[in-house]
């Protein structure tokens, strides 16, 4: 006897029938629309202990089909309320990663097609749409047509691919064929990144055989930007000591403070020293869609490779990272392997994208970008980004104007770094005062997050506990930003008084 509530399709050998799928899909679409409409009724971060949800999930997979109603009910009970709500306008932690309505629709359509974008032949329209989206995004960022590129899953993977290409471009190394191990004559490779650069650069070094010791962190200036003079000195020292410098990573929008490395100066150094210049603009890149913000990135147009994540501040459902490169032939010769069983799929005149990276099978990410860019238009996207920057500047001005709070970094984009520092402490900066301030700020952050209304994250800047407010949700409005500021003040005063 089939279980009550299961469909005839579940008793046979085929897939869900079209009519059943149609009805279920409508319910799911309603469910998502309801979710987005009422997301603010959820606490941003659920009040859960580790393991609590696992204990509610059946330890064994079901032997017999289960009714879809039951499955969706369980989704509504166990999953939806118990995630951290990245879509919530009060989510201001880390960097934004928000799925807009048109982006979600694009993701759904891509899932329906399940196009696997390996070679043009097995994904013709998907490949050509990806080619077009790469050039649309490049133009939206104001970058020259000389850049080719591709979509990947994350900035971590984009930077890894860039480091492999940079390594491949080192004359006489041929790590692709010969590897790095067991070659005693080789000089050790060195990549440079600021002390504020993202850990994905270290991970890329781990994977490429450069190793963490091969990542030289360059000190930053008072505004957390890489110091070009220190880079020049480090390269000279390394060359004298038998290292092989091969790549410089400039970060345009660092993860802690959103500082922007001086790209033009780094490009000059790379040109002089014949080094690969990779730019990590995973978060910050979106700002270049607003033409008046492009001067912040001056010089990035001279990079060999650039990563920018539409899934961060461009309202694109996770995942979508844009990797741009000037010399596609380097990526292709670093990665291309076309085995016999795929040889007839690789045609010329188009990108066979699997030849440019690690993956053979690739998701069809271009569709959601096509739909959302057309839905908002480039001006609409720029207007939203501009508004986030405006709100961040306004938030920063409240912090600066308040005698009990201080700004801890400049605010070039949409993220504010600050801390509570009551005026009554005077200018005291001894270790005990610093410790006290760290404790107050950490408690304030914890209590604000526990309120369920907002979710903020922290970092350390010059050894000081720093609260971050990162804006970038098109559903967040002025009232959210004002509410967050108000709650922070009330909470900090209460924490100090406690
Ligand atoms: N680079 C920077 C500057 C980042 O801020 C981040 C994440 O926040 C990354 C890289 C890693 O991004 P992903 O999660 O796409 O790998």
Image (cartoon, grey):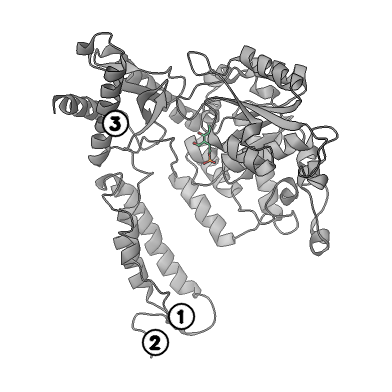
* Whole-percent x, y for residue 473 in the image: 40, 36
**Mark 1 or mark 3, earlier in chain:** 1
Crowding near the residue tagged with mark 3, few <14, some 14–19, many ≥20 C-alpha atoms within 10 Å: many
Residue 387 visible here: no
Measure how far apart labels 1 and 3 are at the Cα level: 52 Å
Given residues 113 and 389, the one toward you in this image is: 389
Badge 1 local density, few (<14 within 10 Å), some, or many (20+)?
some
Residue furthest right as drawn: 172
On residue 442, the disc is 3
Q: Decide if residue 194 is in sight here.
A: yes
- The image quadrant of residue 190 is top right
Q: Are marks 2 and 3 in contact (CB under 8 Å)?
A: no
Q: Say few, some or many: other residues with alpha carbon within 10 Å of mark 2 (under 14 / 14 to 19 / 20 or more).
A: few
| Residue beneath disc 2 | 2
Which residue lies at the image location 43% right of the left edge and 81% below the top edge? 63
The answer to whether the residue labelled 2 contacts the one labelled 1, judged by CB atoms less than 8 Å apart, is yes
> Which residue corresponds to the image point at 71% horizontal and 54% vertical from the top-left?
124
Q: Quadrant of the N terminus?
A: bottom left
Seen in the image, is 410 located left or right of residue 128? Answer: left
Q: CA distance from mark 2 to mark 1?
A: 9 Å
Query: Could you tell me residue 248's position as x and y percent?
Result: 67, 26
Instruction: Identify the residue under disc 1.
Output: 10
Going 26% across and 45% down the picture, which residue do you hit? 43
Q: Is residue 374 above or below residue 146?
A: below
């Amino acid at each position: 006897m089939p279980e009550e509530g299961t469909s005839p399709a579940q008793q046979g050998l085929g897939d869900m029938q079209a009519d059943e799928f149609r009805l279920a899909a409508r319910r799911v679409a309603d469910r998502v629309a309801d979710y987005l409409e009422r997301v603010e009724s959820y606490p941003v971060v659920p009040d859960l202990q580790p393991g609590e949800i696992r204990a509610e999930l059946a330890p064994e997979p079901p032997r017999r089909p289960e009714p879809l109603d039951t499955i969706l009910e369980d989704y509504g009970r166990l999953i939806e309320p118990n995630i951290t709500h990245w879509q919530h306008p009060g989510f201001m932690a880390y960097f934004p990663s928000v799925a807009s309505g048109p982006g979600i629709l694009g993701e759904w359509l891509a899932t329906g097609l399940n196009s696997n974008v390996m070679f043009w032949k097995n994904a013709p329209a998907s490949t050509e749409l990806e080619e077009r989206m790469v050039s649309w995004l490049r133009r939206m960022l104001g970058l020259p047509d000389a850049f080719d590129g591709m979509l990947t899953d994350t900035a971590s993977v984009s930077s890894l691919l860039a480091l492999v290409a940079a390594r491949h471009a080192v004359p006489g190394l041929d790590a692709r064929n010969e590897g790095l191990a067991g070659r005693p004559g080789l000089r050790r490779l060195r990549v440079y990144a600021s002390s504020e650069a993202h850990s994905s650069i270290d991970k890329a070094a781990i994977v490429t055989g450069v190793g963490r010791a091969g990542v030289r962190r360059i000190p930053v200036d008072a505004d957390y930007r890489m110091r070009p003079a220190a880079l020049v000195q480090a390269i000279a020292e390394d060359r004298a000591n038998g290292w092989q410098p091969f790549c410089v990573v400039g970060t345009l929008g660092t993860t802690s403070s959103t500082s922007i490395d001086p790209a033009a100066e780094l490009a000059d150094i790379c040109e002089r020293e014949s080094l690969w210049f990779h730019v990590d603009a995973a978060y910050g890149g979106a700002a270049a869609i607003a033409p008046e913000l492009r001067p912040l990135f001056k010089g990035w147009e001279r990079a060999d490779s650039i990563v920018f994540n539409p899934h961060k501040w461009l309202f694109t459902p996770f995942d979508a990272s844009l990797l741009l490169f000037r010399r596609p032939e380097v990526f292709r010769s670093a990665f291309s392997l076309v085995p016999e069983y795929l040889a007839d799929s690789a045609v010329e005149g188009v990108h066979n994208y699997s030849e440019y990276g690690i993956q053979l099978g690739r998701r069809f990410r271009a569709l959601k970008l096509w739909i959302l860019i057309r839905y908002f238009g480039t001006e609409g996207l720029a207007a939203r980004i501009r508004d986030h920057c405006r709100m961040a500047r306004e938030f920063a001005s409240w912090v600066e104007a308040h005698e009990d709070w201080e700004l801890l970094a400049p605010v070039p984009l949409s993220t504010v770094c600050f801390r509570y520092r009551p005026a009554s402490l005077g200018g005291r900066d001894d270790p005990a005062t610093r410790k006290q301030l760290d404790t107050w700020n950490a408690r304030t952050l914890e209590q604000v997050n526990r309120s369920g209304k907002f979710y903020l994250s922290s970092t350390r800047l010059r050894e000081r506990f720093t609260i971050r407010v990162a804006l970038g949700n098109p559903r967040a409005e002025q009232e959210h930003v004002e509410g967050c500021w108000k709650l922070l003040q009330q909470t900090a005063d209460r924490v100090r008084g406690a």
